Image: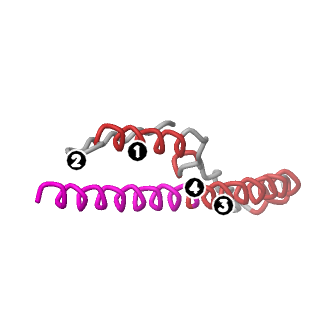
Amino acid sequence: MIRMFVHTTRCAGGAASGAALVAASLANSAVAQTTALDCVPPPVPTADLPRDVIEEYRDELGLEFSTYFTEAQRYLQCLQMAEETARQDIEAALEAYARLQALHSDEKHIQK
């Protein structure tokens, strides 16, 4: 997923500043990132079965639970990667906002 943020300014050198912001945003977002939408929880197995079914299919049920725990671990790892992506996105947005504020501050000084 590539995200692009375009910002133009009215201060001197605004076109160059806007182009630099777009280039920086593209460079940061071109890397494949994991989001929470990429993480699919595995179906939870059930042991709420009649006793005779549990006894007859004990091995299969054990394998089903074992598979679930393996997939649940992958799911949790995916969520951790998604959290890291979200933190990076927020940090990038904060940095972009700080640059925007600095440009806006410079614009006020030029207009005076």
Query: As shown in the figure, which amino acid type bears the numbered disc 3?
Result: Leu
Q: Are marks 3 and 4 in contact (CB under 8 Å)?
A: no
Q: Nearer the viewer, mark 3 or mark 4?
A: 4
Quadrant of the rendered image containing residue 81: bottom right
Mark on residue 82? Answer: 4
- Label 2 vs 3, first from the N-terminus: 2
> Marks 2 and 4, how far apart in space?
37 Å
Q: Are marks 1 and 2 in contact (CB under 8 Å)?
A: no
Q: Nearer the viewer, mark 2 or mark 3?
A: 2
Which one is nearer the viewer's eye here, 94 or 15? 15
Q: Is residue 41 left or right of residue 51?
A: left
Q: Is residue 61 left or right of residue 49?
A: right
Query: As shown in the figure, which amino acid type bears the numbered disc 2?
Result: Cys
Q: Nearer the viewer, mark 1 or mark 2?
A: 2
Residue on which disc 3 sits: 76
Label 2 neighbour load within 10 Å: few <14, some 14-19, many 20+: some
Q: Are marks 4 and 1 in contact (CB under 8 Å)?
A: no
- Label 1 vs 3, first from the N-terminus: 1
Secondary structure at badge 4 equals helix
Residue furthest right in the image: 59
Residue 61 coordinates in the image, percent (x, y): 80, 55
> Marks 2 and 3, how far apart in space?
47 Å
Label 3 neighbour load within 10 Å: few <14, some 14-19, many 20+: some
Q: Nearer the viewer, mark 4 or mark 1?
A: 1
Q: Are marks 1 and 3 in contact (CB under 8 Å)?
A: no
Q: Are marks 2 and 3 in contact (CB under 8 Å)?
A: no
Mark on residue 11? Answer: 2
Residue on which disc 1 sits: 21
Q: Is residue 107 magenta?
A: yes
Which one is nearer the viewer's eye here, 111 or 41? 111
- Label 4 vs 1, first from the N-terminus: 1
- Residue name at image x 50 percent, y 57 percent: 86
